[in-house]
Amino acid sequence: MKQKRISLKKLPMTLHVEALMPILGIGRTTAYQLVKTGKISTIKVGKKTRVPREAVLDYMKTKKVKHR
């Protein structure tokens, strides 16, 4: 199955935790673990947890790129 490319510039200001999955190429459990451990910061909007776009970009900057 072909993966859909996601433009980081077109991401909304805040994302659902599960929206991290295709962006980072991770599963649901890993997405929630990143949030729970504080590796990706979140904000609360009412009762809902959201991930700011900048938090995703900051997390990606801290990771080493593995070339294939």
Image (cartoon, rainbow, N blue to C red):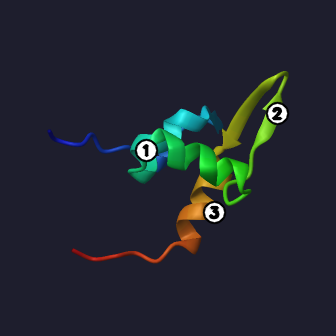
State the SS at label 3: helix
Nearer to us: label 3 or label 1: 1
Which quadrant: the N terminus? top left
> Going 52% across and 49% down the picture, which residue do you hit?
30
Q: CA distance from mark 2 to mark 3?
A: 19 Å
Dot 2 or dot 1, earlier in sequence: 1
Q: Amino acid at mark 2?
A: Lys
Dot 2 or dot 3, earlier in sequence: 2
Pointer 2 residue: 44
**Residue 39 quadrant:** bottom right
State the SS at label 1: loop
Pointer 3 residue: 58
Q: Residues within 10 Å of mark 2 (few under 14, many from 20)?
A: few
Q: Position of residue 33 (x, y in %)?
A: 62, 50
What residue occupies the far left of the structure in this picture? 1
Q: Examine the rendering and report whether any part of residue 7 can be seen.
A: no
State the SS at label 2: strand
Dot 3 or dot 1, earlier in sequence: 1
Q: Is residue 27 above or below residue 62?
A: above
Relative side of 18 to 42, left or right? left
Q: Residues within 10 Å of mark 3 (few under 14, many from 20)?
A: few
Nearer to us: label 2 or label 3: 2
Q: CA distance from mark 3 to mark 1?
A: 19 Å
Q: Nearer the viewer, residue 28 or 12?
A: 28
Q: Are marks 2 and 1 in contact (CB under 8 Å)?
A: no
Q: Position of residue 46 (x, y in %)?
A: 85, 22
Q: Position of residue 35 (x, y in %)?
A: 67, 48
Nearer to us: label 2 or label 1: 1
Q: Amino acid at mark 1?
A: Gly
Q: Nearer the viewer, residue 18 or 23?
A: 18
> Going 51% across and 36% down the picture, which residue do you hit?
19
